[in-house]
Amino acid sequence: MCALSAKPGLRHSVSEWDSNNQRLSAAAQKERDTSEAIRGEGRSLRDQTGCKTTWDERDTSRRLNDRAWDVARCKEALENCAQKLDAEMEALTLSKEQTEEALAATAVPLGVSAECLTLRDGRRGYELVVDPADEQLNKEVALIESVQQVLQQHVDKAFEQLCVLQEARHHLTADLQNKQDALDIDLSCLSLTVKSPQISLKTNPTRIPSGSSTPQEWLQFSLYNVARAQEAMQASQRMREDVSLSRTQVGAGDASKPALQDCMKQNDIQGLDADLQAKTASLKLAHTRLENRTRRPGVDLCRDEVQHGLIDEAHQLEATITALEQKLSDAQHSLQKMKLHHSRMLQDLSRKQEALTLDQRSMNTRTRLRSTSCTDKAPALLVPLTNSSGRSELQLLAQ
């Protein structure tokens, strides 16, 4: 007996079949509508995010470029300050060495004066008198010892100031190195693109690193370093002026070497003239820059900070040149007066030398009045003579 096939499941009516088809069709339509909406939103999102991403990338590149420019300007200011600081350190070192040489040069005059005092202490009897020569020698010794003390103080202060300048230079060097590293990093970031092989996803790149500073703190840090260096340089310049004045005063006390003073005056005049030429060149540069910037077109012909700075620089240079010209004229006039006075001193010295020679010859002549006694002649009659002081020291043989 053949096995009967299984009976089909629950049968549905035509209306149920039709309802099921409508539900499936409605669901499919809904899914299509949803998909269409999602695709539309996706295209819109792609357009919006694409524009946003492009704008953000360009804005970031612009900010990186601006930041690199700011860092470069700050680095340039630090470099200029460092160069001036190096020049001031060299100038102060030279001034210190010259002061040390001047201090060493006082050893010989001090030794000579001390030796003269020692020799004059060998006088005996009433000749051991405190005369004007002794007073002058003692004054010279006291003066030289005082000068040595002042010069030694200048040397010590110059050494201390050099240490301050070196410390300021160390801070400038460290700041410059940091600026260079930051500039290299920003320029490297600026050169990156979406196609660069070096880019990758990082872990928590938006974190704020420890030790971060604000833009205001960043600027104030470098300004403080520059201000500290400028303050140290100003103190060093004042010190060099004081040292130079002290050395000049020491040299002015040596009346036996007018030719040396004349040479030093010549050097000062040459320095003033050279500085005048340098300031004239700087004025030419400022005038040229001002004139060239007048050719800026349209609205770019702006009275910006550069324009104001150049105008101030030109006015300052003009005032400086006027002052230098006046000082140069004063120095040249002083030199001529010194030369004239030097000539008068030489004439007076020549007259004194002639008078001294005549006195010496007179003394040598009077020695012939002292004759020895002759055994073959009668004793001669001695006639006393008096000199200009009234003392009877000379005798003349009466024939």
Image (spheres, rainbow, N blue to C red):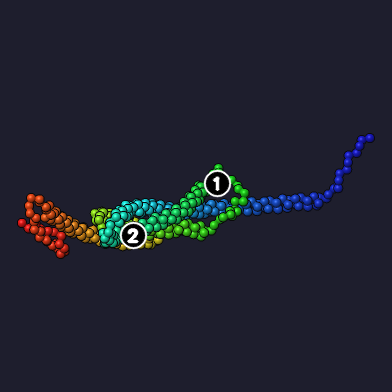
Instruction: Let me know if residue 256 appears in the view.
Output: yes
Residue occupying the point 18% across, 57% down: 349
Give the labeled residue for mark 2. 142
Quadrant of the snapshot with the C terminus = bottom left
* Amino acid carrying mark 1 in the image: Val
User: How far separated are the C-alphas under marks 1 and 2?
Assistant: 82 Å
N-terminal label among 1 and 2:
2
Mark 1 crowd level (few <14, some 14–19, many ≥20, 10 Å Cα)? few
Residue occupying the point 49% across, 58% down: 221
Given residues 28 and 49, the one toward you in this image is 49
Give the labeled residue for mark 1. 194
- Left or right of 242 on screen, residue 206: right
Q: In which quarter of the image is residue 127?
A: bottom left
Name the outermost residue toward the right.
1
* Amino acid carrying mark 2 in the image: Ala
Total labels drawn: 2
